[in-house]
């Protein structure tokens, strides 16, 4: 499906709003009530679902609707807590998606890797499965820390972690994995060349 410029712009804008969400909440609460911000969050999430539908990514659209439903239910109990728990829901959703793919032929990281390299050898396939598990661990850990900030930390700490530190940690994992992968691959190739690779 060919996307028009407005649709692409809307997709990018919604993605940016999602990434900057904690900072927007921090400054937004000084101007708007938690109810208004919660409504704005739900609109953004549902609009994201619409963009997924246009892109024919129906599973992602369904997940976005599910997230909106969870946030809505949480908002009935506490609008402010629902707002602060949104990063937790996102991390748990991502972790769940990655976990589900472990029970398929192609874990999530393998699917992403095949977009660049369609032909993966057995070693690479096994490596992507292990890396998928590492990302699951990251999302779960991130959700636990984000949950702590939502329940016990002030808005400054909540914003700092969810709006900056969590992204830095994600970037470190993403970038730091590359040299580790190269090192492990080189060691594997040396063992294979020397005929010492384990069966």
Image: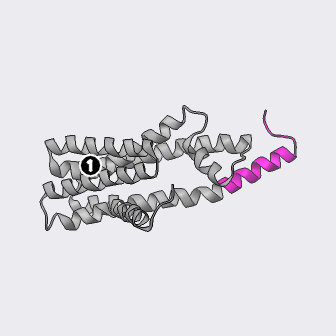
Q: Nearer the viewer, residue 50 or 14?
A: 50
Q: Is residue 151 above or below residue 31?
A: above
Q: Position of residue 156 (x, y in %)?
A: 24, 63
Q: Residue at x 39, y 66 (%)?
A: 6
Residue at the spot of label 1: 85
| Quadrant for the C terminus in the image | top right
- Percent from the top left, x then y, of residue 29? 16, 63
Horizontal arrangement in the rendering, residue 71 relative to residue 190 (left or right): left
Q: Name the foreground residue: 188 vs 59.
A: 59
The correct choice, above or below, for 189 with respect to 179 in the image is above
Q: Position of residue 160 (x, y in %)?
A: 31, 63
Query: Which residue: 20% across, 40% down?
Result: 73
187 lies left or right of 71: right
Report the magenta residues as a range. 181-199
Residue at image point 32% right, 44% down? 65
Q: Tell me the element at label 1.
A: helix
Within 10 Å of the Cα at label 1, are there few (<14), some (14-19), or many (20+) other Cα atoms?
many
Q: Nearer the viewer, residue 44 or 76?
A: 44
């Amino acid at each position: 499906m060919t996307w028009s410029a407005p649709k692409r712009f809307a997709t990018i804008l919604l993605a940016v709003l999602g990434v900057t969400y904690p900072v927007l909440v921090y400054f937004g609460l000084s101007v708007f009530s938690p109810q208004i911000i919660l409504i704005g969050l739900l609109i953004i999430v549902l609009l994201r679902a619409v963009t997924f539908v246009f892109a024919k990514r129906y599973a992602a659209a369904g997940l976005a609707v599910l997230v909106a439903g969870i946030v809505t239910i949480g908002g009935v109990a506490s609008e402010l807590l629902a707002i602060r728990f949104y990063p937790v829901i996102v991390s748990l959703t991502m972790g769940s998606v990655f976990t589900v793919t472990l029970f398929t032929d192609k874990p999530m990281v393998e699917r992403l890797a095949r977009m660049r390299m369609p032909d993966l050898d057995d070693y690479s396939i096994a490596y992507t499965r292990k890396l998928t598990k590492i990302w699951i661990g990251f999302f779960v850990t991130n959700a636990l820390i984000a949950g702590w900030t939502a329940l016990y930390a002030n808005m400054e700490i909540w914003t700092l972690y969810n709006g900056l530190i969590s992204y830095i940690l994600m970037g470190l994992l993403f970038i730091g994995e590359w040299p580790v992968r190269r090192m492990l691959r080189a060691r594997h190739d040396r063992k294979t060349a020397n005929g010492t690779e384990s069966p």
